[in-house]
Image (tube, rainbow, N blue to C red):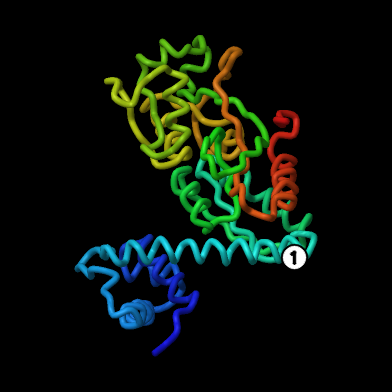
Amino acid sequence: MRSLTLKHLRYFDALARHQHFGRAADACAISQPALSLQIKELETMFDTLLVERGARKVVLTAAGEDFLLKARDVLLSVEELEDRMRAARGPFAGRFRLGVIPTVAPYLLPNTIAALSHRFPEIDLELRESVTQSLVRDLLESRLDAAIVALPISEPGLQEFAVFREDFVLVRPTQDADKPVPGPETLKTMRLLLLEEGHCFRDQALSFCDMTKTQPRQLMEGSSLSTLVQMVGAGMGVTLIPEMALNLELRAANVSVARFPKPSPSRTIGMVWRKSNPLADQLMQIAAVVRGVGRPEKAVS
């Protein structure tokens, strides 16, 4: 009889997350038959079915759910042990898994990667772009070391470090460039272009306009800030974007930009990590590098 290994636990965790053998195999960088064999070995070890195999989706059995909880406890303990050993080595070296929200990644990551590689020559960056909810889940389940998000997160298990604050700006058609800047009440009457559900920037824009998710309004949705800006250029409405996106998004867009009077809508960008992570000192150093790359003149203490 084969012994239980960390590989078994990691593969089972991936299958539970993706609920599909093909996608889980891709995430683990192995073939689907190899993953299926590992899961079958697990079930044979314990003489218990851990998953229900459907045509389109894998569902955990009751035994599988219980096994998953224990497996993730073990994986988290192993990750923390590895982190402690990395922390004892001094300057940051080795794998560092960083998540970034989509409304930050294209604008902050290129210079951040260069700065981190210069500050920590032995760092091995692994980057993931996703919405806040997904990044928080991966942090808590130890699949990420840290994430750059909009604060606050207000998750008891996570440490938050504010990096900088930035304003939102209004993007509208060029023919509206000389018009007064609309306030929140006026924006409610306009066709407002927003990101799809799940993006925190969408909720921040709705909050500025004092709109609820269920309030009737003329809204159109896009999958990215680039899409929204191009839609404005096509005369389909107006949108709000964060200040850091201006240089990149306005290069090929026929739009005008207006700044709101103070107090203008804004967001705080920060880095978050598990409170239990023993690499706290190194993470603070990484956050300081991100602060330097972002908006040092708008840094938040």
Helix, strand or loop at disc 1? loop
Q: 212 or 3, which is in the foreground? A: 3
For residue 254, above or below residue 138 = above
Q: 47 or 147, which is in the foreground? A: 47
Quadrant housing residue 235:
top left
Please state which amino acid type lies under the numbered disc 1: Glu
Give the side of residue 59 with respect to residue 122, left or right. left
Which quarter shows the C terminus?
top right
Q: 66 or 36, which is in the foreground? A: 66
Q: 181 or 24, which is in the foreground? A: 24
Return the x and y of residue 193 as percentages of the image width and height.
39, 29
Return the x and y of residue 220 as percentages of the image width and height.
33, 30
Which quarter shows the N terminus?
bottom left
Return the x and y of residue 143 as percentages of the image width and height.
52, 59
Disc 1: CA contacts within 10 A as few (<14), some (14-19) or many (>=20): some
| Residue projecting furthest to the left | 55
Give the side of residue 54 with respect to residue 94, left or right. left
Return the x and y of residue 260 as percentages of the image width and height.
56, 16
Residue drawn 46% across the image and 70% down it:
10
| Residue projecting furthest to the bottom | 1
Residue drawn 38% across the image and 60% down it:
17
Quadrant housing residue 194:
top left
Residue drawn 47% across the image and 27% down it:
204
Give the side of residue 216 with respect to residue 247, left or right. left
- Dot 1 corresponds to which residue? 122
For residue 148, above or below residue 246 = below
Q: How many marks?
A: 1
Residue drawn 51% across the image and 51% down it:
140
